[in-house]
Amino acid sequence: MTNPIFAAIAPPLRVLMGPGPSDVHPRVLEAFARPTVGHLDPYYLQVMGELQQMLRQVFRTDNPMTLAISGTGSAGMEATVVNLIEPGDRMVVGVNGVFGGRMAEVATRAGAEVTRIEKPWGEVFSAAEVAEAVEKVRPKVVGIVMAETSTGAWQPIEEISRIVHDAGALLLVDAVTSLGGVPVEVDAWQIDAIYSGTQKCLSCPPGLSPVSFGPRAMEAMQRRKHKVQSWYLDISLLASYWGEERVYHHTAPINMTYALHEALRMVLEEGLEASFARHLRNHEGLRAGLQALGIDFTAAEGNRLPMLNAVKIPDGVDDARLRKDLLNLFGIEIGAGLGVFKGKVWRIGLMGHASRTRNVLLFLAALEQLLESQGRPSVGGASIAAANAVFAQA
Ligand SMILES: *Cc1c(COP(=O)(O)O)cnc(C)c1O
């Protein structure tokens, strides 16, 4: 037995253009590296308070119960589900990709009687489809994914919210990929509970999950007959730490909180509307370039997410080899297809700090070269020219 001393961490510099994590801004990494203080240190409590205020701005809500769960986006999914659901409660979940499926699984484990409504991958739910399910099931909660990162489909929320509330149910929204990249209007759309993640459009490492609960959700939580099944994720306990009392619950991930604080400062410095416009412009540039290469999207026009471009791999292209070459020769990571899209789809992320014109152009140049190296006919730089034409207009 040997006990080797390993080399210090020295990760390669990547361009993270997959489904997350996305590129982290250096300012965020610098914030992360600041000295750790205690989780009840007056400085840390101040940072927590500022973080909550900034989260409310980004979620566009006045909800007092807005905080960051310790854990990645899936922890936010668990937290919202287990706090709203008691064993035997009925819940409708929209499943049109991996993450709707995950929410249904989490709800089932929490003891909900889950009704899955399904759509083919790449499609979204119409308000009428949700209305039909809600009328039939009469659920306590309806869960829906706004930005389905496995398919690139953009689910509209506002009309569904009205339908859910007319039926007396609560609306739970997955905004892991949408927050910071497209408008998310918690108060205007009357979303009752919502969760997100740090490593998609907020340009922060993975590790925290922003959540917010509205007044109807708070009431439902106060009326619970059973304790929340998860001690760690029980909002009533977390509220005593995030609220005035500052009661120890678990040790907060101090440095992740610094990182998210800086990431949110950057989002608000740029401005939410400017950030949405940037995500859209870079998506349009990428789309024009891909079109010049004959590459098509999986989601229908009008339902495509700007920050997650799921596209069909051209016939005859070796998926694994192309992604490996992209990584090894150009340092670019893109995402493979999941589930039914495995081997058929690439997921090109333009999230947060990764949503930059230079990344679009670098990616298109690399893709053109690699497609040619796999025997596809040359397009002579047409993808870059097409993207540049879009950027010139902007
Ligand atoms: C990434 C993602 C999640 C899960 O988040 P993790 O940080 O991987 O736990 C959930 N929902 C959607 C839509 C996502 O894109």
Image (spheres, helix red, strand yellow):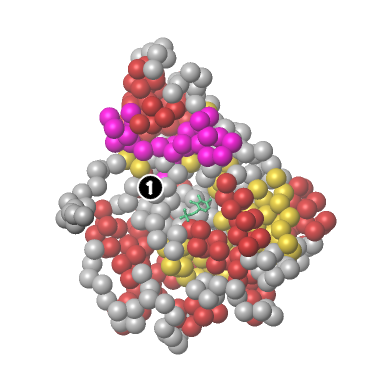
**Image coordinates for residue 81, horizontal then vertical, percent:** 61, 65
Q: Position of residue 85 (x, y in %)?
A: 66, 69
Nearer the observer, 112 or 349:
112
- Secondary structure found at label 1: loop
Q: Which residues are magenta?
A: 325-352
Which residue was labeled with disc 1? Answer: 22
**Residue placed most toward the observer, 20 or 267:** 20
Query: Tag 1: residue type?
Result: Ser
67 to 374, vertically: above or below: below
In the picture, the quarter occupied by the N terminus is bottom left
Kindly tell me whether residue 264 is visible in this rendering. no
Quarter of the rendering containing residue 263: bottom left
Residue 184's spot in the image, x, y percent? 54, 56
**351 in the magenta segment:** yes
**Left of 6 or right of it: where is 317?**
right
| Residue located 59% across and 36% down the image | 340
- The outermost residue toward the right is 136
Q: Is mark 1 within 8 Å of ligand 1?
A: no
The image shows residue 213, relative to residue 164, as above or below, that is below
Residue at 51 percent across and 30 percent down: it is 343
Tell me: residue 277, above or below residue 235.
above
Asked if residue 281 lies in the magenta stretch, the reply is no
Left/right of residue 120 with respect to residue 167 in the rendered view: left
Residue 289 seen anywhere in this rendered image of the structure: yes
Q: Residue at x 23, y 67 (%)?
A: 34
Residue pictured at 67% horizontal, 75% vertical: 220
From this viewpoint, which residue is outermost toward the front? Answer: 1
Residue 182 image point, x, y percent? 50, 49
Looking at the rendering, which quadrant does residue 382 occupy?
Answer: top left
* Quarter containing the C terminus: top left
